[in-house]
Image (spheres, grey):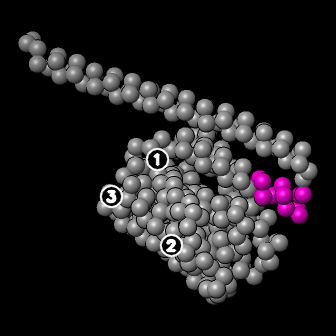
Amino acid sequence: MRKLILLALVGLGAQLVDGSLGMAYGVTSTTLLLAIGTNPAAASATVHLAEIGTTLVSGVAHWKFGNVDWKVVLKIGVPGAVGAFAGATFLSGLSTETAAPLMALILLALGLYVFIRFTTMGLPKGRLGLPLRKRFLAPLGLVAGFVDSTGGGGWGPVGTPAILASGRLEPRKTIGSIDTSEFLVAVAASLGFLIGLGSENVDFGWVAALLIGGVIAAPIAAWLVRHIPPRVLGAAVGGVIILTNSRTLLRSDWIDASDGARYSIYAVIYVVWAAALAYSFREHRKNAAEERRIIEEAEARTADEQRRETEPA
């Protein structure tokens, strides 16, 4: 029972992060499942089955708040489903000894991307209004779906930054559209895992626990997407993913590092992580203050112009 409650809290926290950043539900949840010794393919299957419910609720919530571009959802979601099914089939055929470090390596790369992107840049800004074409979204969805299945997460970390970097869709609609299209990816990946593994390898109690936590958090995250500082949250989540998957890799047969080497690397990660959090928080406050200053100056100019127009000649 204690493990199920913990998993429900993980699902809640992961969905809060995912609904606010447009990424990291699968990466965060899969990382925890691997840390407690779950088979890599079963961990990814468990997360994707839970995501069928969480992404459905999240998509509806984002739609209600006006955060979804349905053209983008279809253009990226259908190729994403194809890639996810292929990735699930591929991972199901690997042995645990091969799959565990491979998944940890993919998750570590995704964690580094999230960590560096949000620590140094926050949410990228660019040109709004230009259309996102199918020739850009289709290959992106195919790759993101494959990575999502094989890494237990990756739809958001691959898809969200790419669309944000294009500058053609505002951040809230990017996040809402990615979260909504992930429903198609979760369904396709789950089918692939059930065909490749069979239902006996999936703990449906764990699926239910992750699902309950994620469903509770989904509407809250859709509302928080306009208020939560993504720069700080991205740095925090990225650090957790890096630390956990570094531990898996260092203990694997691929590396098999000594205790001294492992603890030294952990210490470096902790120091860099703490520094990144402090820097992200400071930059967030500085940018927020700069934005307030610009708004106040614009309001002052407008008020001054209105005053001059009302003064007698």
Q: Which residue is mark 3?
A: 66
Inspect the image, locate mark 3, and give the three-letter code of the amino acid beneath it. Answer: Gly
Inspect the image, locate mark 2, and give the three-letter code of the amino acid beneath it. Answer: Ala
As drawn, 164 above or below 274: below
Callout 3: few (<14), some (14-19), or many (20+) C-alpha neighbours within 10 Å? few
Q: Which residue is mark 1?
A: 127
- Residue 137: percent from the left, percent from the top? 54, 66
Nearer to us in this view, 118 or 39? 39
> Is 56 contained in the magenta span?
no
Residue lying furthest left in this view? 312
Circle on res. 208: 2
SS at mark 2 in the image: helix
- Residue 76: percent from the left, percent from the top? 51, 69
> Is 255 contained in the magenta span?
yes
Inspect the image, locate mark 1, and give the three-letter code of the amino acid beneath it. Answer: Arg
Nearer to us in this view, 188 or 82? 188
Callout 2: few (<14), some (14-19), or many (20+) C-alpha neighbours within 10 Å? some
